[in-house]
Image (spheres, rainbow, N blue to C red):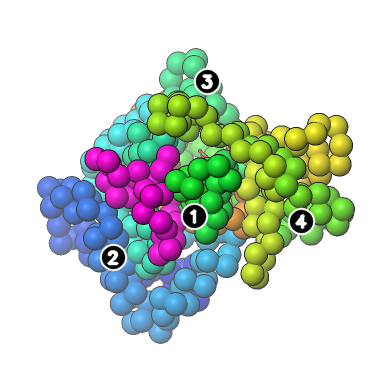
Amino acid sequence: MTETDLATAVRAAVDHWMQTTELDQRKAEMANPATLSAMLGAAVQCNLVLGGHTSAVARGFVGQAPYRHLQQVFDAADLGDTPLGFFPVPDTAGTMAARAAVLAVHGVLNLETVSYATENDGNQFVNLVAMPGDGAFAEKSKKGMRGHTDGVSFPLNGEDDAKDVRIAPSPDLVTLVGLRNPKNVPTKLMPLADALATLPLGDVDELKKPQYSIRSQKTFVQGMKRILGKELVVVDEPILKDVAGGTYVRYSHSTVVPSEPGGLAEQASNNLEAACNQIAVPVVVQAGDILIINNRLSLHGRGEVGEDVGGQSRWLLRAYALDTSNLAVHKRHLGGSPPHVLFP
Ligand SMILES: O=C(O)CCC(=O)C(=O)O
Ligand SMILES: [Fe+2]
């Protein structure tokens, strides 16, 4: 299987859905994303089979790769102006096709499209755009980003937070969708295996020791204060974890610090970061593209976005996917939230 094979199967499913529905019907179907994802995922599966592939192969093709770039999987026309904040995503034909493409991809992979109640009010799709003003979010939105994984203070899938079993895992996949990217600002992919191959073994050992404390990323903090009463901060955690068939990572420069500063643990995380910068692969997510990032096998960052806001400025959508086949129900937020909203 190639990225083009998968992209072609997704494109056919999305085009068919767009051609056979009107805006009102699309909105109604989008209100039940799990059902729509299963339906579109089944359509992708049919298209794969027609092309001589299977969805099981697609799951391995995506699940074992640090990232996959699917180009031109939907028509990014009819968008309206670039929004000025994380949400809402405006309901236009272009953003509907974009969201359908994500649900189609997650559907064929048997993954649920999830969000967290504490981040962006639990919105399943958010705009990644440069924001006006001079608050912390606005400033960050225009800058580059160093290597990180998303939802870094949450446990790996299948594990519990040491103090609160309700805390859901961080996403398995971070899926970015291109709506516009006129200045070709790259997203930077940092496959973990490539970074670790350049590190001394001693550093890798340090990164596997439970000796780092992890704060939550800025987008979660306000919501955590509301829902948990405080920001989630975890202590004595490793950055790397060996699992069957590989090594997983959770890391963010701004939120992960060694419990004891100035020692080997700090040297190792600094070296990991330098290694990530060295091996980073720039990928320009163009209008109509989907970039699937494995949030365990790859870190990601981005280049400088710049000052342009609104109008025709850069606009990506982001969604998260999680294998929820073994997810305990207490890790969902529920209580009036849609089922895809996880706790916290
Ligand atoms: O804008 C991008 O290309 C990536 C953004 C990102 O990684 C994030 O918002 O967490
Ligand atoms: Fe990110």
Mark 1 residue element:
strand
Q: For the magenta stretch, what is the residue range?
A: 317-344
Marks 3 and 1 sit apart, C-alpha to C-alpha, by 26 Å
**Which residue is identified by label 4?**
196
**Which residue is identified by label 1?**
173
Q: Circle 4: is it few (<14), some (14-19), or many (20+) Cα within 10 Å?
A: some
- Residue 181 — which label? none
Residue 146 image point, x, y percent: 65, 38
Question: Of label 1 and label 2, which has the lower sequence position?
Answer: 2
Marks 4 and 1 sit apart, C-alpha to C-alpha, by 20 Å
Give the quarter of the image for residue 131: top left
Q: Which amino acid does label 2 sit on?
A: Ala
Marks 2 and 3 sit apart, C-alpha to C-alpha, by 38 Å
Residue 331 image point, x, y percent: 41, 49
Farthest residue, direction top: 134
Mark 2 residue element:
helix
**Pick the front one: 230 or 186:** 230
Residue sitting at x 81%, y 41%: 265
Q: The C terminus appears in which quarter of the rendering? A: top left
Question: Of label 2 and label 3, which has the lower sequence position?
Answer: 2
Question: Of label 2 and label 4, which has the lower sequence position?
Answer: 2
Marks 1 and 2 sit apart, C-alpha to C-alpha, by 17 Å
Q: Circle 1: is it few (<14), some (14-19), or many (20+) Cα within 10 Å?
A: many
Res 147 visible: no
Vertical order, 182 against 143 (above or below): below
Residue sitting at x 65%, y 44%: 251
**Which residue is identified by label 3?**
136
